[in-house]
Amino acid sequence: MIQSVLRGIDTIALLPTGGGKSICFQVPGVILGGVTIVVSPLISLMQDQVSALAKRGIGAFSMVGIVDPAVFEHVLSKAKNEPFFFLYLAPERLSSRQFGRVLKECTISQLAVDEAHCISSWGHDFRPSYRQIALLRPALPGVPVTAVTATATPRTIRDIYKNLRMKAPTVVHGSFDRPNISFSVLNRVDARSSVLALLSGVPGPAIVYETSREGVEVWTEKLKRAGISAVGYHAGMEAPVRERAQSVWMRKKVRVIVATNAFGMGIDRPDVRLVVHVGIPGSMEAYYQEAGRAGRDGKPSEAYLIVTPDATHARKALLNSRSARRRFEFMRRYADRRMCRRWAIMGYFGEEKAEKCGECDVCTGAH
C-alpha cells in the first residue's frame, strides 16, 4: 500500500474499522515531503487526526469554519517551509480562495480522500460535494490519490475510482472481518427490556443507536430512569452540547451514549464492549461501520440489532429513493434469514468465510 503511493500510483485501501487507515496516507506524506491534502467529511475526525499528528511533532492543520487571515498566513508559511505538512479540509472547502492559494504556492505531494465511500451514491454516507474532488486532478498532474474506507462493496469501489478519475489504481483489500465481535438480531415487540438486559449482562462502555433525534431523547431518558448513566447525541443539538456529550462519554464520565448516525465516524474509543441498534440502519455499510465501534481493542465484544415494528416503520418512512429501498431490503433480509450473521455480512462485502462464526444468535440457536 505505502509502496504503491510512493511510486506515484493511485491507491484504494479497504481496511476494517480500527485497521489504521490514516497510516496509509500519513506515512507516505512524511516520506514524500511537501503538503498532503486530506479531504475528510467530519470536523471531529479531522481534529482528532491533526491532534495525533501534532503530538508526534508533525505539522498539520484543519481548515474548519472561517480561518482568520493571520492564522491562515501562519499556516501557509509552515506548509511552504516545513519538510512535510498535512492540510485537512472538508470537500466543500476545496473551492475556497484560501485553498486556491495553497494549490498555487505549495508543493502538493499527495491527495488523500478519507472515508472515500462518501463519494459513491451507493455508499451509506454519500456526500455530493465529494464528487468535486476530481476537479483538482488537472491542477495536480502526477500527484497520486490515496482513497481509504472501512466499508465498501465491489460496486462502491468501482464508483470510487471512477469518480476520482483514477487510472489503473492499486486496490489493497484487507479483510473486513471483525472476529472479536459477536453479531446477533433480536425480533421484539418492544426493545426496552432487551436493551436493559443486554446492558446488565455485558459490562463496560456501550453505544445505543437510534434512527431519530426524538428517539435519542426518549432512550436517553429511559436509561437514566433505569439507573444507567447515559447521554444523548444527535445533529439537532447545538455543537457545544454535542461536543460535551461526546467528551463526557469519551472521558468515561457516563457509561452509555445514545445517538443517531451523526455519531460514530472517527470516534476512537477502543474499549466499547456493546453496540445496540434500536433503530434499523439504512444499509449494511452503515450498520457494519456503527457496530464496528465495538471492540476496537480486539477484545470480545457484542453487537445487537433489535428489530421492532416501530423501528421498521421509522426506517421505511425515510426511504425516499430506489437505491435507499434496495439497501434497506438487504438489512431486512439480514434480520430475517437464519444464516450465520458473519457469513451474511462478509458475503455482502464480497468476502467469503469458510467457517461459521459459532457465536451469533443463528449459530448458537439463541434467536
Image: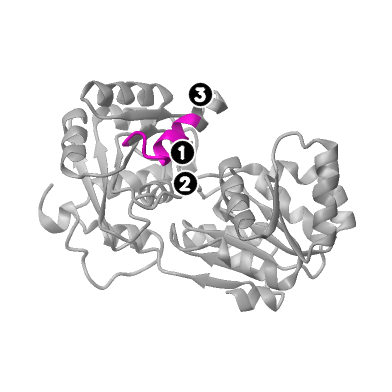
User: Element under label 1?
Assistant: loop
The segment highlighted magenta reads 244-255
Residue annotated with mark 3: 237
The spot of residue 173 in percent (x, y) is 48, 70
The spot of residue 219 in percent (x, y) is 31, 25
Residue 195 shows up from this direction? yes
Residue annotated with mark 2: 267
Q: Is residue 244 left or right of residue 77?
A: left
Front in this rendered view, residue 108 or 170 = 108
User: Element under label 3?
Assistant: loop
Residue annotated with mark 1: 263
- Residue 179: image quadrant is bottom left
Q: Is residue 309 part of the magenta span, yes or no?
A: no
Identity, as a three-letter code, of the amino acid under mark 1:
Phe
Q: Residue at x 23, y 20 (%)?
A: 225
| Image: 339 above or below 96 | below
Q: Residue at x 66, y 48 (%)?
A: 130
Identity, as a three-letter code, of the amino acid under mark 2:
Ile
